[in-house]
Amino acid sequence: MAKPTIEDVAKRANVSIATVSRVINRQGGVRAKTEARILTAIEELNYIPNAVARSMVKKTTKTIGIIIPDVNNPFFPEVVSGIEQKARENGYFTMLCNTNESAETERELLQIFLERSIDGLIITTADEDGEQLQAAIDAKIPIVAVDRAVKKYELDTVLVGNIDGAYQATRHLIFQGHQKIAIICGPQNTTPGYERFLGYKRAMDEYGLPLVNEYILEGDFKEASGINLTKKLYQQADRPAAIFSSNNLMTMGCIKALYELNWKLGEEVAFIGFDDVDIATFVNPPLTLVSRPMRKLGEVAFDILLERMTRSDQGAKRHYVLSPELNIRQSCRLK
Amino acid sequence: MAKPTIEDVAKRANVSIATVSRVINRQGGVRAKTEARILTAIEELNYIPNAVARSMVKKTTKTIGIIIPDVNNPFFPEVVSGIEQKARENGYFTMLCNTNESAETERELLQIFLERSIDGLIITTADEDGEQLQAAIDAKIPIVAVDRAVKKYELDTVLVGNIDGAYQATRHLIFQGHQKIAIICGPQNTTPGYERFLGYKRAMDEYGLPLVNEYILEGDFKEASGINLTKKLYQQADRPAAIFSSNNLMTMGCIKALYELNWKLGEEVAFIGFDDVDIATFVNPPLTLVSRPMRKLGEVAFDILLERMTRSDQGAKRHYVLSPELNIRQSCRLK
DNA sequence: CTGAAAGCGCTAACAG
DNA sequence: CTGTTAGCGCTTTCAG
């Protein structure tokens, strides 16, 4: 038999579809006996309410879209876990999509989300200019930006203290006695990339250390650039004594390069990285890292989104900044 | 203004909604001039077709559900990438959900998927008995099982050669001269867990090596059990000379334990693991591993699903088995 | 080539 | 407490 509908149930239970609807939605006001009959019919028919039809009339899908720029970066799945848990708890379903850092893909995905009438969106955009968000803005759906801000539109935003984290990291290196500190930056047109550089700069300035051009390299937050830039650092006549890597993937690349170059970590060069990596405690010496509250980031993002979706007061957009934490191990002190 | 509908477009372009529908769906048979007028109206109104309404009448959502048991296991995101790419290419959208190895969560997720009328399902079930799949089976939606088979129902299935892979791994250890080979098994009530043990057993049998109870430990495919069981192995009076770990996460745990115990990898104990891990080339010596074609797994799964969704011939269910590959590095030969 | 109209399955008044 | 009915926005005959 074809998929049973609310009408099939109604017929079988000898009631109207309105009554069936009432029990499905637990609205009460149905005689116990009638309800029992309906429940039985539902059971027997294997009836499953059709959410598509429901959305059609309720104009809400209880679905939120999540857009991240890189699934292969373990940072994001962790953030997503935070979002998902909160969402599930609140009766929302999530649709997760990956743009691979392409603003164009982002635009397409947004289109699909909009067609499917998501109730809200949590996004780490591939392009902070925000041009590609146009359609979503026009559609007036609630949006929360996570980890990266958006310039063109005023959005609710939840970030981590990039400047602060990078500042602490750099200062830690300085406290260990290093002066020739190199930084492998992220893209300077992204908030995390730029702010982490700013934190580095602030610490260097504060302790009267010069900013050396050769020690300031810009990568793209991917593993390959970590490898390449580390090699570049190694080739310099006057090698840095310490390296600060701006994110997890570049840290991976950096460490791989160190191995390959036989540039001895903890002996010839000190290291500190932004973001946790799996290998932190495997390499020798273990890596000192700036770690971010990833799940928390997702949870906060959903909370804000939920408020926007349910409350209509629509006050001013909010900007949250969570604090990172310095996780000290042994890679910063040279023996 | 509220979200514009097809009717708004029709009015603005001075045509009927039927005609608008025709151009939205590129069905042709519309005068060029009329079409142009409609396109303009769509543009001006920022009209986005409502997929919910469409699904309502077409009875298809162009959405497939994906259920995996553990997002934190890098194996699955990789498989999912394979699925997603193929899906997107074919105009399908994917909804990804994680059960955390809970059959109960799986049942709930299935219910949600069914309510939302997914067109098909790709699943790595949390419980191979398959009881919890009932509703999906009843709903008669196409299902493809990946990585784990389902006992209760006859399903299209795509697996990797677990037995073969484990056999090769164990044999490799034997070829390196090891005899006291321990195995950290996965749950024996799962296909991958059981079959990998079978491969181990086959190799041991074939080369006349005894199966020692103390060397055969059962874990749960998670990191913690890798740690615990490795410690258990270490505590034995007669320690094994080599360890075969049945999956990536347990490999991580195993290596961590080795470090902690100061049980020297590559000197006092050899190691081989099933599945790739990030740290493979970071530890010293680098790890020899059995690696699986993860993306391919996802691609094949989608191909099969697509056929089931589009063709109605519905022949017998198919079982695919992809081949794993032995990735030899240096962790199996003791110095 | 274009329009009118009948639903798709469900919710939400409104009546009884 | 329960039933009737009017849509939700769109696709799809069927007529013109």
Image (tube, coloured by chain):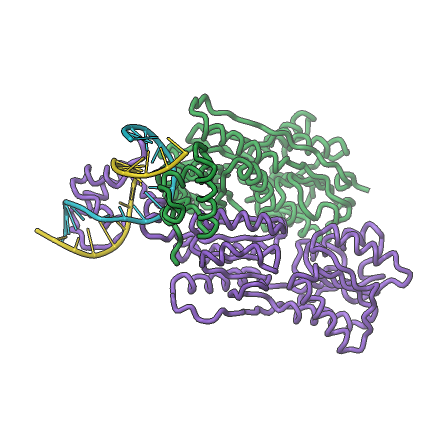
Chain colours: A purple, B green, C yellow, D cyan
- Along the line of sight, which residue is nearer the eye, B105 or B225? B105
Judge whether A298 appears above or below B301 on screen. below
Q: Percent position (x, y) of residue A117?
A: 42, 50
What residue is shown at x 68% (from left), y 45% (from top)? B237
Q: Is residue A44 visible?
A: no
Q: Is residue A241 left or right of residue A136?
A: right
Q: Percent position (x, y) of residue A102?
A: 62, 50
Q: Is residue A62 left or right of residue A112?
A: left
Question: Total of numbered circles in the picture?
Answer: 0
Image quadrant holding the C terminus of chain A, namely bottom right
Q: Quadrant of residue A187?
A: bottom right
Q: Is residue B141 left or right of residue A36?
A: right
Q: Is residue D6 left or right of residue B113?
A: left
Q: Quadrant of residue B320?
A: top right
Image quadrant holding the N terminus of chain A, namely top left
Q: Is residue B220 visible?
A: yes
Looking at the image, which residue sits at the far right? A237
Judge whether B23 appears above or below A286 on screen. above
What residue is shown at x 60% (from left), y 32% (from top)? B162
Q: Percent position (x, y) of residue B295?
A: 61, 37
- Along the line of sight, which residue is nearer the eye, B285 or A198? A198
